[in-house]
Image (cartoon, grey):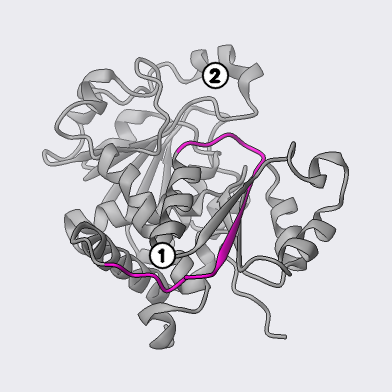
Amino acid sequence: MKSPRHFLRLRDLERRELEALLHRAEELKRMQRAGESHTPLAHRNLAMIFEKSSTRTRVSFEVGMAQLGGHALFLSPRDTQLGRGESIEDTARVLSRMVDLIMIRTFSHAGLERFAAASQVPVINGLSDDHHPCQLLADLLTAQELWGSLQGRRIAFVGDGSNNMARSWMEAASILDFSLRIGAPEGFHPAPAALAENASNTQVFASAEEAVSGAEMVVTDVWTSMGQEAENAERLQRFAGFQVNQGLMARAHANAVFLHCLPAHRGEEVSAELIDGPRSLVWEEAENRLHAQKALMEFLAGFGPLHQSGV
């Protein structure tokens, strides 16, 4: 049996595949808005395993699968034997004999890789502690709609440079050849291995002001991710001075825009004035989860023009 194609990190796609997938997402978005029916995944099933809570991931995958003609099943640890000690491998072997795609939102990236290794069908990373590639598809789609191409652009990521969003942005910069400038406090810079892997396109700064200088897009994320709640008080102190607000945006390019993967904590990593203002593209970005993931599922399931063209 041919090994399935998984999407566990952005680097699982080659540049030509990523670019083609983003263009396909734009096409699917146009089709959906025009009311065109497109159901290549009729009678196909997506299993969605959630170990972390979700709004955008669950809704975008569930609605996306329905729009493609298929069906999505929501599974939490409380609903499956995973929560009672069944091994990751056994769960993967069973589920992949019954469904056509599996999406997992979890903590351990190593556990996700173990699941994929035992699965007979494509596995999608809906979020892990190390990577958030589906969010990057939406972010890159938003940038592509704005600019056409990201090559040569300057993007700043302000906040926790060691988290999954920063790492996925680093991979995106390397693949699509744009400049990523990370502004993060000491102790929250990217891991040395991640930085070494993406060093050609990523620079790290100890101040937000340096990072956003001349940036055409400024991105941030919450300072305390799921599973880090016990560190919240300390993180609020360590990240003081790294809020993205109108003052910080004044140091960016005059036409710079703002992205946030959401949920947002107004008054912490971003000011309410900025996220709710005209420079913010966060709502377009959130919607683009739906369209980008539809293109991804179509591709991984072996349907649509990307598969047919051999991309």
Q: Is residue 227 magenta?
A: no
The three-letter amino acid code for the residue at tag 1 is Leu
Q: Position of residue 178 (x, y in %)?
A: 32, 58
Residue at 41% over, 40% down: 182
Which corner quadrant of the image does residue 91 belong to?
Answer: bottom right
The residues colored magenta run: 37-55
Q: Is residue 233 above or below residue 129?
A: above
- Give how far apart the Cα atoms at labels 1 and 2 are: 41 Å
For the residue pair 53 and 74, the one nearer the viewer reads as 74
Is residue 156 rendered to the left or right of residue 172? Answer: left
Which residue is labeled 2 in the image?
235
In the displayed orientation, state which residue is furthest to the left. 254
User: Which structural element holds mark 1?
Assistant: loop
- Location of the C terminus by quadrant is bottom left
Q: Is residue 201 visible?
A: no
Q: Position of residue 109 (x, y in %)?
A: 68, 50
Number of numbered discs on residues: 2
Mark sitting on residue 219: none
For the residue pair 259 and 205, the one nearer the viewer reads as 259
Which residue is labeled 1 in the image?
68
User: Which structural element holds mark 2?
Assistant: helix
Is residue 280 rendered to the left or right of residue 1? Answer: left
Q: Is residue 257 visible?
A: yes
Which corner quadrant of the image does residue 269 belong to?
Answer: top left
Which corner quadrant of the image does residue 153 belong to?
Answer: bottom left
For the residue pair 245 and 203, the one nearer the viewer reads as 245
Q: Is residue 46 magenta?
A: yes
Give the dominant element type of the magenta stretch: helix, strand or loop. loop
Q: Is residue 123 above or below residue 107?
A: below
